[in-house]
Amino acid sequence: MIEFTLLRKSKKSAARIGILKTPHGEVMTPAIVPVATLAAVKALRTDEVAATGTQMLISNTYHLHLQPGEDVVKSAGGINTFMGWSGPSMTDSGGFQVFSLGWGKDLGVGKVTSAKAASAHHPDKIEKAIAKGNQPKHVTITEDGVKFRSPLTGDEMFLGPETSIAIQGKIGADIMFAFDECTPPGATRDYMARSLARTHRWALRSLAARRTKQALYGIVQGSNYEDLRKESARFIGEAEGFDGFGIGGDLGESREGTKRILKWVAPYLDERKPRHLLGMGHVEDIENIMAGGADTFDCTVPTHYARHGIAFTSKGRVDFTKAPLLKSKEPVDRACGCPVCTGYRRNYVAHLFRAGEISGGAMLTVHNLWFFNGYVARLRERIKKGTL
């Protein structure tokens, strides 16, 4: 199980500082949680990840179920032993795949995509597609759970509250999440209300299905509808047995929208328990995320962007696929003390990307994780000083 100790609450915002104790160590919160989808942060060894200041990792239940399978992970001693990670760990429920394989794929939108922008490219497509009784093309959502086909074998597969919790139990992370439906931006209120009621029923079934001592978080949904978000926060917050809370689904059409959603739900969630924001964490979002009261948040931004040649620096983003950087003898970021910035120059990193060498992506992944963790640590100091 876990233990959360609230150390300080901001008088300026809902930001707070705490310590999250898990069977694999402590996390000073707020903290970013990098994504280790298939029990790996792409391009790095786990000791390299730990050296960036990363405190906790989150892996993907759906993908680990596909390969190598939860039984393989369990027989290896659980996710931490399997991947050689000594720190705290999480697994998501697979609910995001309900979205990404379904409405997300059908509509070409992401969970933080502006509904207005999506509609501009697909006039009326969202509202017509997500009508009462409609289903995504590649996913069938029922009261029992979700049916879909394996992208690896084409075999029909099923994921529901009981199967998700059973899989997560075998994977063995410190924290797991209740099964839910991650709804798309632009979902009609009628669709959202029906989905939310089902997600709440799935939450109770997830609680009933737990057979291990792992912590279990319930997930607050409700899209951009204030009454539904509050209803969900109240329901999940009052459900007996959850050790913490996730805040999921589409999280607003702007940074202000996300800030608004956090403001709606925070008052209904027991402040003695940790709160995790699912799938969001651009640099520009982090201050709002922390000010809104989130204790942890996961995001692929630092690692995904790194593999595409983008470094986050004290002066902004730098694209290492661009030819002019081949002439630069500066470090990736003069203000950074990571192993990449202290040992290599921009011209060399740019060369690696232009030559197609995989080490370029690995180097920027180290730098970006170092940068993100450092940025979060500085914001924690601001909470301590009362300026955030």
Image (tube, grey):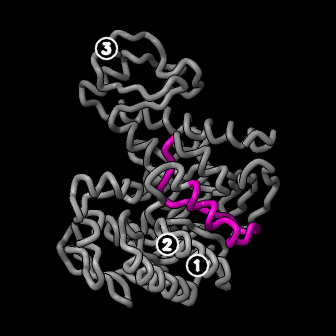
Question: Helix, strand or loop at disc 2?
Answer: loop
Residue named by callout 2: 222
Kind of residue at badge 2: Gly
**Label whose residue precedes the other's in the sequence (1 or 2):** 2
- Residue 237 in the figure: left or right of residue 205: right
**Label whose residue precedes the other's in the sequence (1 or 3):** 1
Question: Helix, strand or loop at disc 3?
Answer: helix
Magenta region includes residue 260: yes
Q: Position of residue 37 (x, y in %)?
A: 41, 57
Residue named by callout 3: 324
Q: Residue 101 occupies which quadrant of the picture?
A: bottom left
Q: Is residue 4 above or below residue 121?
A: below
Packing grade of label 2 (10 A; few <14, some 14-19, many >=20) is many
Residue named by callout 1: 231
Q: Residue 351 occupies which quadrant of the picture?
A: top left
* Camera-nearest label, 2 or 3: 2
Q: Are marks 1 and 3 in contact (CB under 8 Å)?
A: no
What residue is rendered at 48% in x and 27% in y?
Answer: 316
Number of numbered tags placed on the structure image: 3
The dot on residue 366 is none
Q: Position of residue 43 (x, y in %)?
A: 39, 42
Q: Position of residue 305 (x, y in %)?
A: 39, 39
Magenta region includes residue 225: no
Q: Position of residue 382 (x, y in %)?
A: 74, 39
The N terminus lies in quadrant:
bottom right
What residue is rendered at 65% in x and 70% in y?
Answer: 244
